[in-house]
Amino acid sequence: AETLALLSSGRYPARDPQRCLGDLQAQIAACARGAAELLTLGETFGHDVVAAYMAHVQDNAETQVRTAIRGLKNGHFAYEMDNGATVKVAITITGDIKGPWATVDFTGTSPQLSDNFNAPLSVTRAAVLYVFRCLIPSDLPMNDGCLRPITLIVPSGSMLNPAYPAAVVAGNVETSQVITDALFGALGVMAAAQGTMNNFTFGNANYQYYETIAGGSGAGPGFHGTSAIQTHMTNSRLTDPEVLETRYPVLVETFAIRENSGGAGQWHGGNGAIRRIRFLEPMTAGILSNRRRIPPFGLDGGHAAAPGLTRIERTDGSTEILGPTARTTLAAGDAIVIETPGGGGFGTAKPS
């Protein structure tokens, strides 16, 4: 009752407190079950044995990351965002008696921003962990051992390590994508993915909805990019059209691959997607995105991909192009069309 009262109070109360409460109960149940299973594991095999195996998992991760680092070269990359900010990174490979080390230095990245594209240090660290985990071909549980051979330098007061009260809502969903692409670019192992999650929201007094939309992944040496896929730092999936149209006054008129939007090259980038949603009653809609002005880059002679585009198609036949970050009102019958970026190409295309 107390939790329901909190969810129902305040200036912006939850629209469906019972559903929120169900989500919280499910999370608590999952944590309780996990804790119980961990206690059972310790009682069955002994706490010292379990602790030893946990240490082994981390030690193994460290060894495998060092092996991956051994095959890398020094590199640097600077990647501009649509708002003019730049993520700059230099990767230096060294070694000592323990083995190879990688220093990942974000010095030169833009200072803390006045908008909400700042990324907390935890997000920056997670992006670095993700990239180096991707370099390991074997199945390896994600754990802190992966970061032991990596020295991370992120200047305080930069957009990747901001100070309170910096706005950071887009740091997790947008800037994280830029960090991963910049790291892959510095390593020279993969062209840029779509570089955005295309965060799309709409709602009114009765409805509220939020989705992210897939795009193209980048190509690399020996592989093409993949079309219409969630890339890198996102793991969300779209609501089924039947469910979306049942619960909300909208029609999903198009969800298709955006042909020829991937970057050309010896290995071509994946194509983005086209998503058209028509509204059956007035709504307010918003888009939080990137890669509308600066296209996803290609590498090693590969071409850049097509940037994204968001537009409104009004019932009177007029069209309105939205910026990377925008808010608009829609009348009944209006449609929003989101064309997501492709992935960059890799390598110079061979003559046909």
Image (spheres, grey):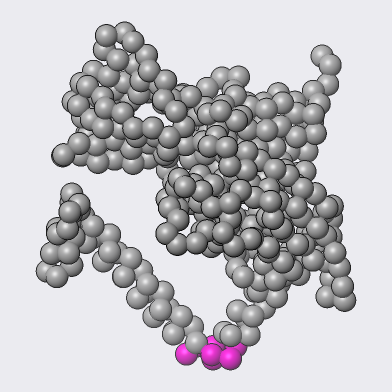
Q: Is residue 195 magenta?
A: no
Does residue 26 appear to the left or right of 321 in the view shown?
left
x, y percent for residue 24 = 27, 64
Is residue 231 positioned above or below 333 on the image?
A: below
Image point 85% across, 64% down: which residue?
Answer: 94
Does residue 22 appear to the left or right of 189 in the view shown?
left
**Region of the chain picked out in magenta, as a range:** 43-49
Screen quadrant of the C terminus: top right
Residue 222 visible in the picture: no
Which quadrant holds residue 33? bottom left
In this view, the residue in front, 54 or 264, is 264
Image point 29% across, 40% down: which residue?
Answer: 209
Screen quadrant of the N terminus: bottom left
Does residue 201 appear to the left or right of 331 in the view shown?
right
x, y percent for residue 46 = 54, 91
Image point 22% across, 22% down: which residue?
Answer: 331
x, y percent for residue 52 = 63, 85
